[in-house]
Amino acid sequence: MCPYQFLMRYIYRTQKQPLFFSDYGSFIHKILELHLNGQLEKDELAPFYLRHFRENVRANAPSMAIFETYFNQGLSYLDDIDFPYSTPLSVEKKVDFSLVGHPFTAIIDCVANDNGIIVVDHKSRTLKPRSTRKKPTKSDEELDRYLRQLYIYSIPVKELYGEYPKALVFNCFRSGELIKEPFSEEKLEEAKKWATEQIRIIRDNEQWKPNMEYWKCRYLCDCRDKCEYFQMNRG
């Protein structure tokens, strides 16, 4: 998103600042983890959400309207949850693996068995299912960008379970949409090539110039309070 943010987060290891969107997503992930591990029953999810929301979502939302939308969507999802993979093989599993000679670490939200291995990623973003159009829509292209992550996750999944997943699933909890995509080894190779190119770009980069966009800097950058560019331009 921003080369300077990458420099601060992953090279200088700047401490992350709380953000509404990341706090919110992490809190829902936490609740789903507790549920799928058998620590919270279905009828306990919404009450837990209500009791512990403010202590987990510390940062302010950009506006009251956004806060109310996110809060109500999370409550509605947990109050009437219908997650089909209630007996997963693993939940929030941390794995270390190698991709074309480079070390990677992944935390996989959920691996389940549905007549074959499936990988599930919980998403606060409201992705859209793939269209049936011959020419990919912008939503189709966005879906493919997000699927790269799950294709890369399929590498350690094969190491763990002896086979590639048969499907990749996005659990878009704000919209209640469950998007299931069949696994493709061709797309896995495309994801590997993309990741390799991104590593090359990062390693060859010498100028860590910021991408100054007010919304992203103010509400999506977890290094904003330590970023001199943002501080100089925030007024």
Image (spheres, rainbow, N blue to C red):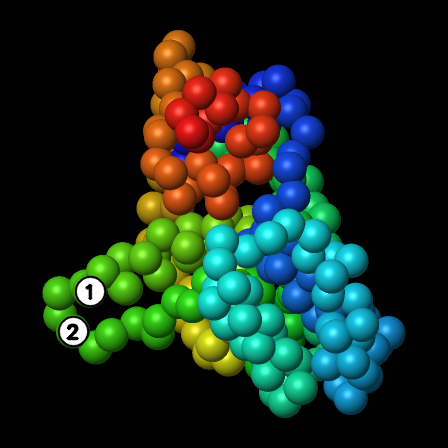
Marks 1 and 2, how far apart in space? 7 Å
Crowdedness near tag 1: few (<14), some (14–19) or many (≥20) residues, C-alpha within 10 Å: few
Mark 2 sits on what residue?
133
Q: Report the side of 187 relative to 15 (left or right).
A: left
Residue placed farthest to the right in the image?
39
Depth check: give the residue in front, 224 or 122. Answer: 224
Residue 186: x and y, percent?
34, 54
Q: Nearer the viewer, residue 151 or 137?
A: 137
Position of 14 with respect to 2 (left or right) is right
Residue 170 x %, y %: 49, 68
Residue placed farthest to the left in the image?
135
Residue drawn at (34%, 46%) of the image: 190
**Up-down relation of residue 99 to residue 5 (above or below):** below
Q: Nearer the viewer, mark 1 or mark 2?
A: 1
User: Which quadrant: the N terminus?
Assistant: top left
Q: Which residue is label 1 attached to?
A: 137
Of residue 204 and residue 213, the one placed in the foreground of this image is 213
Q: Is residue 161 visible to us here?
A: no
Residue type at the position of mark 1? Thr
Disc 1 element: loop
